[in-house]
Image (cartoon, grey):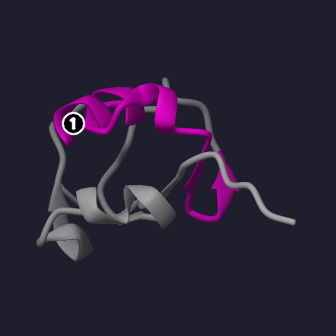
Amino acid sequence: MPIDLKCYATLAPLTPGNAGAFPIKDGETILALAERLAIPIEEVKIVFVNGLASDLDRVLVDGDRVGIFPPVGGG
């Protein structure tokens, strides 16, 4: 069951090489995915699944488009 995964800004270096078709486990949540990718959970500020803001406990399904964003500042 692959998903399309994108990590943005300071999390971009943690994007796996197969992010366009990243395999997930049955019942895997966004939180479990972040932990598997060694993304520090305190660095995850916003997650989008299929273009909609999502909680970390959302269960991922085949074909989901996932974007993970860190806190972003600017001026």
Q: Is residue 13 above or below residue 69?
A: below
Q: Position of residue 24 (x, y in %)?
A: 18, 46
- The residue nearer to you, when weighing 32 against 64, is 32
Image-based side of 65 in relation to 15, left or right: right
Q: Which structural element holds mark 1?
A: loop
Magenta residue span: 28-53
Would you name the residue on which mark 1 appears?
A: 38
Identity of the residue drawn at 18% across and 61% down: 22
Identity of the residue drawn at 40% across and 36% down: 30
Image-based side of 39 in relation to 47, left or right: left
Identity of the residue drawn at 49% across and 24% down: 57
Q: Is residue 36 above or below residue 18?
A: above
Q: For mark 1, does the 10 Å Cα neighbourhood hold few (<14), some (14 to 19), or many (20 or more) residues?
A: few
20 within the magenta span? no
Identity of the residue drawn at 87% across and 66% down: 75
Q: Is residue 37 above or below residue 73?
A: above
Quadrant in which residue 5 is drawn: bottom left
- The residue nearer to you, when weighing 2 against 41, is 41
Amino acid type, residue under disc 1 in the picture: Ala
Q: Position of residue 2 (x, y in %)?
A: 20, 61
Which quadrant, please, contains the N terminus? bottom left
